Image (cartoon, coloured by chain):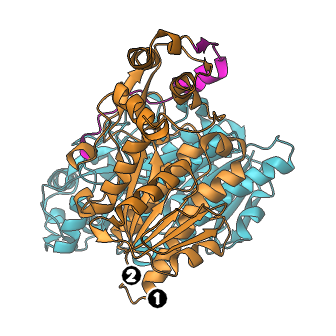
Chain colours: A orange, B cyan
Amino acid sequence: MKVLIIGAAGMIGRKLTGRLVRDGKLAGKAITHAHLVDIVTPQAPADAPFPVSLDAFDIAASYAAAKLVAPRPDVIFLLASIVSGEAEADFDKGYAINLGGTHSIFEAIRREQALSGGAYRPRLIFTSSIAVYGAPFPDKIGDEFLAAPLTSYGTQKAICELLLADYSRRGFFDGIGLRLPTICVRPGLPNKAASGFFSGIIREPLAGKEAILPVGDDVRHWHASPRAAIGFLLRAAELDLSLLGARRSLSLPGVSVTVGEQIEALRAIAGDKTVALIRRQPDETIIRIVAGWARDFDPARAKSLGFQADASFSAIIKAHIEDELNG
Amino acid sequence: MKVLIIGAAGMIGRKLTGRLVRDGKLAGKAITHAHLVDIVTPQAPADAPFPVSLDAFDIAASYAAAKLVAPRPDVIFLLASIVSGEAEADFDKGYAINLGGTHSIFEAIRREQALSGGAYRPRLIFTSSIAVYGAPFPDKIGDEFLAAPLTSYGTQKAICELLLADYSRRGFFDGIGLRLPTICVRPGLPNKAASGFFSGIIREPLAGKEAILPVGDDVRHWHASPRAAIGFLLRAAELDLSLLGARRSLSLPGVSVTVGEQIEALRAIAGDKTVALIRRQPDETIIRIVAGWARDFDPARAKSLGFQADASFSAIIKAHIEDELNG
């Protein structure tokens, strides 16, 4: 089985690559080739049991999609997009990459299918986002609630979900869209995302560093560990997608906790001294942005299809300690 | 006030033009110019109290949108699209016109706003469709139900709704999307639309002609007269669109009736002999298509914003007799 990962240099892309290298297979089939692509050349994984090719492409470039699809990969992980803040700051770039780039890959698959006389029909796994939802919403967002995004990023993801459903319905590919919860604990350096503090207040104190908490302890949000996210991608690769019917995108299971509950979970694992490194410094801009975010979901469809959340926020912290801090 | 109607040669476009010519104003302001555009040159209205210019453009042509927007119309009615059956039969054409053409007009407005130093921000009234909804759905579709279209046409409309909301949120224009009920009674010749019989079983018998009924009497559907549709467009032109918040598209009020109820309303108005011209001839294809269509809505938002449905299906028939058959 040939695998293409678009967005392979990002955090999820690197972890997915690592997992595929360890497993040597996907959906029960041996991987015969992996093509790793991002806007910058991804790092070659060490000790891969299959050949790996690396490429740097901007999916907004008009020639890129055809080149990526021409080798006819069996499974395509489409993880590439610019983040919410950048898509809001740069309208043209957000639409060009997050909508135009994705659409051009869908179109390239359609053309490749035509060239193959109809034989080519890959599985396409697209990472969408809970940003397709915008306030006002119920305490728990159900599977039939409307997508009414409040950002250009969320709009672009919602549009790609609609395209993915139509291209799948028409048989051009077998697609699934995954609305990932906010990934927590994100490893690496603090970033400027408005959501960054959800990870920062765990990751930084565990590393002995101060973390800024810009919102109140009562803010509730929806989380999944990087480990759970990789589990979602692998489940999407093996699932019989006809079970989705026409509705090809899913809100995935997560852990709904308040910031206060996050902090108490950290205290139980790492103690008062660690928690004391969290400094409360309210930021009105971030408070306002976060107020528009989903707090909780009832992801009944995804659960019934075997997608599994982390067991608790404590489990999310422990996964971070095991996977990033060598236990 | 300068008005641009894109799709002016269609049934709704012609009726809207006629109404603007009669009124001489829109949203309480005198019309100073009307630009009527369609894929074929629209007919010039007789006795218009304002100057009218006519043009033929394919909105899928890359140069078209900029030309349409350059005169900076104050109100743009964007009615143009190819119909559901054609968008399903011709994937490329449907996306090029219904999505690409609409998006290019949105983009042309954004560029024109930049050229104007931010001053230009027209009102944009877009006709969407209840085809953004796909089965399974509740008996009455509420304002928070997800858009999960089962056709490429419905997908294209749902995507345009998302774009319209984002472009409005960013301030590029002041947009509203109107999910029109099925228009009944459509005047003119029978067409090949799967929905054509809903009008045909009224229009043809009233003209002394036989009509084919391809579905059962228990099929329920959602209707508005052409007169109500024009009322929706005029209401959209005068409404304070900030009342919509971020959710810029509305399911509009309609009349939910079964085919049997349609027939009984016709009988009460035109008698048994007229009804006897309806010939039952089940068509499995049409039965299957129609089974996926919305039956009823709870359009609470649109009602609260002053959009008014026809009073009953009898009123819809009477409007047809008054407007099309000279009473």
Image check: B116 left or right of A113? right
Q: Which residues are magenta?
A: A277-301
The image quarter containing residue A68 is bottom right
Observer-nearest of B39 and A146: A146
Q: Are marks 2 and 1 on the same chain?
A: yes
- Residue B132 in view of the camera: no
Residue that mark 1 sits on:
A115
Which residue is rendered at x = 78% and y = 53% of the image? B111
Visible in this render: residue B255? yes
Front-most of residues B198 and A245: A245
Which residue is at 36% across, 66% downward? A24
Which amino acid, mark 2? Tyr
Question: Residue B257's x, y, as percent?
Answer: 22, 48
Magenta-drawn stretch contains A230: no
Could you tell me if the residues under marks 2 and 1 are in contact, i.e. CB atoms within 8 Å?
A: yes
**Element carrying mark 1:** helix
Q: Which residue is mark 2?
A: A120
Q: Residue at x 58, y 45 (%)?
A: A153
CA gap between label 2 and label 1 equals 9 Å
Q: Chain of mark 1?
A: A
Mark 2 or mark 1: whose residue is earlier in sequence: 1
- Residue type pointed to by label 1: Leu
Please count the marks in the image.
Answer: 2
Is residue A259 rendered to the left or right of residue B146? Answer: right
